[in-house]
Image (tube, grey):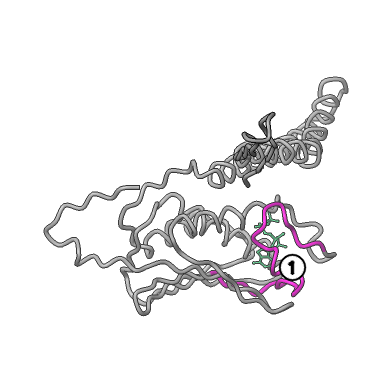
Amino acid sequence: HTELYATAVGEDTDHKGFLFVFRDRTEEERVDEMKNEFISIVSHELRTPLASVLGFIEILLHRELSKDKQMRYMNTIHKEALRLSNLINDFLDLQRMESGKQVYHFSPVNLVPMVQEVVDQWHSKEHQINIHHMSPELWVRGDVDRLRQVLHNLISNAIKYSPGADRVDVHVTSSEGKVSLSVQDYGLGIPEDAREQLFTKFFRVDNTDRRQIGGTGLGLAIVKEIVEGHYGTIGFQSEMGAGSTFTLELDEFELSSMDGKIVIFED
Ligand code: ADP
């Protein structure tokens, strides 16, 4: 990311030389990229829900409508405004993480109750979410809010991309100093040619099966950023028509190392 300029300097033959200038363009380029990206999001992703919100408000303001119709339109406005708000939050989250401005508040986290809490917040009509854990305590060092966000995104995808299935399984296990958290669904699966790009922001699989399923293509990019911010790994296995399993792995935290000591975690 560094540019090099070289110019010949000096008038007389005895004092001729070259002047080399190194210029770091990283920051400038990054700002440019962000601007371009933002413009493309505003034009593609934000305009559509906004146009729909404005359209429905226009109708509500200028037409005599039955109570029933009014309610229906207001529900649509609410849904579209929520979509906009989620999109903006996800986009800003990701921007903060990518620019290294995300501050993680690390502390010991027992993943078992955390998983339970996140699962309890889900109210899926079709899916039962089952938790399997090999012990009641599996500790890692992490930022609990961000780890919740990871699990939330993975469960959200598992449910969204398995229409017709009735369950999602969450496993928490540990082995050889690593804790694994996996989310397994029995849904559409991920096509071979999409696998490399899956964690890239704004990437969405485009096929008829999932055209109706809403999303921004930011969820997995956020997951990857957070997991890497925790020095962990994330991967998946998938079979078309049979389902997908996303697994993240973090270093296990040895609670015994805290016995009798006051431990201060620094970011
Ligand atoms: P979004 O769901 O908003 O499109 P994500 O970044 O979460 O964005 O996911 C990117 C793409 O990966 C999705 O569009 C979807 O096609 C595919 N995908 C993610 N999770 C799953 C899953 N559990 N099963 C099948 N496909 C998935």
Residue plotted at (50% across, 45% down)? 100
- Magenta stretch contains residue 198: yes
Indicate left or right for 262 with 166 as reference.
Answer: left
Q: Name the residue under label 1.
A: 194
Dominant secondary structure (helix, strand or loop) of the stretch shown in magenta = loop
| Residue bounds of the magenta highlight | 183-206
Q: Which residue type carries mark 1?
A: Ala
Placement of 177 over or under 52, stated as above or below:
below
Q: Which residue lies furthest to the top in this view?
A: 62
Indicate left or right for 113 with 13 as reference.
Answer: left
Say whether residue 65 is visible.
Answer: yes
Q: Does the residue labelled 1 lie within 8 Å of ligand 1?
A: yes
- Magenta stretch contains residue 20: no
Nearest the camera: 198 or 173?
198
Residue plotted at (38% across, 56% down)? 142
Say whether residue 68 is visible.
Answer: no
Q: Which residue lies furthest to the left in this view?
A: 260
Residue plotted at (69% across, 72% down)? 187
Residue plotted at (68% across, 35% down)? 13
Hey, which quadrant is residue 209 in on the image? bottom right
Residue 27: percent from left, percent from top: 60, 38
- Of the four image quadrants, the one with ligand 1 is bottom right
Nearest the camera: 17 or 69?
17
Residue 163: percent from left, percent from top: 71, 66
Residue 232: percent from left, percent from top: 46, 64
Nearest the camera: 150 or 134?
150
Nearest the camera: 64 or 81?
81
Hey, which quadrant is residue 30 in on the image? top right
Placement of 42 over or under 112, stated as above or below:
above
